[in-house]
Image: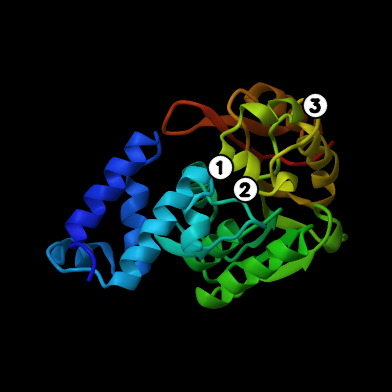
């Protein structure tokens, strides 16, 4: 037999802190290997682990020192209270994106809407909105076939009827207009690559991270293309990199001169979202 659960957690916490890694990852991995919810794990602290579980858990804790994200080892991440499968083909969903969804849910009128998520990745945005607002029609687009496979699997697991399309930005839905357009596009400047953590730089898809010299390449394209897909009262929600607020605001103010283009700040007081609303007409 292996050690007791509390002993295994204490070892993992000590090991990870010594390596300057996040100690909670030990608990996430042990829950993964035991199949326990957190409450069950905490209630079983004096139970002994079987030797196979202990050895597998030890090996995964030690693998964290290579930089591999714990989410890749357990194959999932929590987002808006739900479990989403992740892989090396999609970005790991982050809390800032939850804040973008919360902002949009507050602004959406109480009627069935047509919604598109551009660059869906794991499907976290599209699936969450469909589950929060079941009467909406939600479409999601991604350039990556592998990312769409992950998103479709998440949609099936979570029973979300989202319509998926493969293609570049909005091109697969040419000729259509939407009430709400959402995107969390690549926004990291190419030159910042070396400053990223190894978990991001080595293990997350570069196509979903980097966007030209200044990180604004995809926002420029979206600002050019989105007017063809909006209605006069549409809402646009964009996640942005911290410090990009004024630059992205200017792009969308030019694209939608009559609209309100608001910079929104996250819980850490960083500019992380742009919301475009009001009069979306070009005249």
Residue visible at 50% across and 26% down in the picture: 270
SS of the residue at dot 1? helix
In this rendering, would 74 be left or right of 53? Answer: right
Tag in front: 3 or 2: 2
- Image x and y of residue 209, in percent: 69, 41
SS of the residue at dot 3? loop
SS of the residue at dot 2? helix
Toward the viewer: 143 or 264? 143
Q: Name the residue under label 2.
A: 203
- Image x and y of residue 15, in percent: 32, 43
Q: Quadrant of the C terminus?
A: top right
Of pointers 3 and 2, the one earlier in the residue sequence: 2
Please say whether residue 98 is visible from this viewpoint: yes
186 over 257 or under it: above or below: below
112 over 79 or under it: above or below: below
> Residue 86: which disc?
none
Q: Name the residue under label 3.
A: 213
- Image x and y of residue 175, in percent: 87, 61
Label 1 Cα crowd, 10 Å radius (few <14 / some 14-19 / many 20+): some
- Marks 3 and 2 sit apart, C-alpha to C-alpha, by 21 Å
Label 2 Cα crowd, 10 Å radius (few <14 / some 14-19 / many 20+): some
Residue visible at 28% across and 67% down in the picture: 37
Residue visible at 62% across and 62% down in the picture: 113
Q: Mark 1 points at which residue?
A: 199
Dividing the picture into quadrants, the one containing residue 20 is top left
């Amino acid at each position: 037999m292996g050690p007791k659960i509390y002993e295994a957690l204490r070892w993992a916490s000590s090991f990870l802190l010594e390596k300057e890694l996040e100690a909670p990852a030990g608990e996430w991995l042990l829950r993964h290997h035991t199949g326990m919810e957190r409450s069950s794990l905490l209630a079983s602290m004096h139970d002994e682990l079987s030797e196979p579980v202990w050895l597998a858990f030890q090996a995964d804790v030690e693998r964290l020192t290579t930089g591999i994200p714990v989410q890749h080892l357990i194959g999932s991440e929590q987002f808006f209270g739900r479990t989403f499968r992740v892989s090396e083909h999609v970005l790991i969903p982050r809390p800032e994106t939850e804040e973008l969804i919360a902002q949009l849910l507050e602004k959406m009128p109480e009627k069935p809407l047509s919604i598109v998520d551009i660059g869906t990745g794991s499907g976290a945005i599209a699936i969450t909105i469909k589950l929060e607002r079941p009467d909406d029609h939600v479409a999601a687009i991604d350039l990556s076939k592998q990312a769409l496979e992950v998103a479709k699997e998440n949609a099936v697991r979570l029973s979300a009827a989202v319509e998926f399309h493969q293609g570049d930005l909005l091109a697969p839905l040419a000729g259509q207009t939407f009430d709400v357009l959402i995107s969390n596009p690549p926004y990291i400047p190419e030159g910042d690559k070396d400053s990223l953590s190894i978990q991001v730089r080595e293990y997350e898809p570069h196509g979903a991270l980097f966007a030209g010299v200044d990180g604004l390449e995809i926002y420029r394209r979206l600002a050019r293309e989105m007017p063809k897909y909006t209605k006069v009262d549409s809402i646009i929600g964009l996640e942005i990199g911290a410090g990009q607020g004024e630059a992205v605001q200017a792009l969308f103010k030019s694209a939608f001169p009559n609209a309100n283009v608001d910079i929104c700040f996250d819980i850490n007081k960083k500019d992380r979202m742009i919301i475009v609303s009001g009069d979306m007409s070009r005249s």
